[in-house]
Image: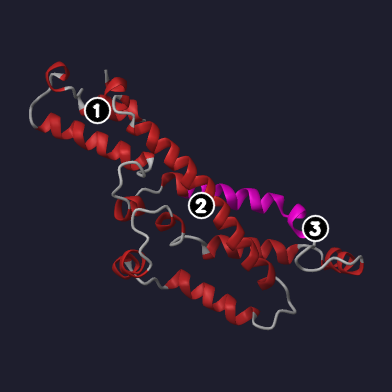
Amino acid sequence: NAYSYIVKDGSIFRGLANSLLVTAVGTFINMFMSTTLAYPLARSDFRWRNGITNMVIVTMLFGGGMVPSYILVVNILHLRNTYWALWLPGAISAFNMIIIKNYFQGLPKELEEASHIDGASDLTIKVVLPLSKPVLASVGLFYAVGHWNAYFNSLLYIDNVNMKVVQQVLREVMQQAQQAETDELMDWGSNGAPPSKAVRMAST
């Protein structure tokens, strides 16, 4: 009965599809942004390397806060009820980018020099990324798990029931079951809601 209660309106399946989309596209955006910033910062001959690295580190120490972020996303960028509200605010993680940068710095410079001698440019070089599969897989997993577990941004920016992620849908289902329980309507046959603990376990 708890399983039937969760899946009765199909919202859990819409939420699952939304979460898969947000996770896949969001991880791609994260990896693209992190990799393209980490590569030039890993180059010792890049002129503004130290300055930009310090700017990135500052963002790890200080944040603008939730209210300015909300005003920026909703009032200035007008991204409410769009998936971009879930992708753009966290498009890059400074910590993950520094992990990729440090890995790039540990690769032998001779391989890059040999590629340049063979005619490869910084945009077409095909040596760094194949050698970086371990760090890219690890950081990609960090990003994917973060997107999958995130529900707070969806709670802030998404009102459209067809765009809510699965974590937000499950949260609302459990809140409804708990409310029915507090109203002392414990008989699932009369109000359509099984006990909240049963709903929580079925959701898990």
Quadrant where the N terminus lies?
top left
Q: Would you say the residues marked 3 and 2 are in contact, meaning their CB atoms lie under 8 Å apart? A: no
Give the x, y percent position of residue 27: 54, 51
Mark 2 vs mark 1, foreground winner is 2
Q: Which mark is residue 126?
A: 3
Q: Nearer the viewer, residue 170 or 7?
A: 7
Mark 3 or mark 2: name the one nearer the start of the chain.
2
Quadrant where the C terminus lies?
top left
Find numbered disc 2 in the image and state the secondary structure of the residue it sits on: helix
Quarter of the view holding residue 76:
bottom left
Above-or-below relation of 109 to 202: below
Q: How many marks?
A: 3
State how far apart marks 2 and 1 are (Cα): 32 Å
Q: Name the amino acid type tagged 1.
A: Lys
Give the farthest residue toward the left.
184
Mark 3 or mark 1: name the one nearer the start of the chain.
3
Find numbered disc 1 in the image and state the secondary structure of the residue it sits on: helix
Q: Which mark is residue 26?
A: 2
Residue at the disc numbered 1: 197
Q: Which residues are magenta?
A: 126-146
Is residue 4 part of the magenta span, yes or no?
no
State how far apart marks 3 and 1 are (Cα): 53 Å
Report the predominant secondary structure element of the magenta stretch: helix
Specify whether 66 is left or right of 146: left
Mark 3 vs mark 1, foreground winner is 3
Give the x, y percent position of residue 136: 65, 52
Q: Residue at 42% across / 52% down in the picture?
A: 83
What colouring style does the render use? Answer: secondary structure
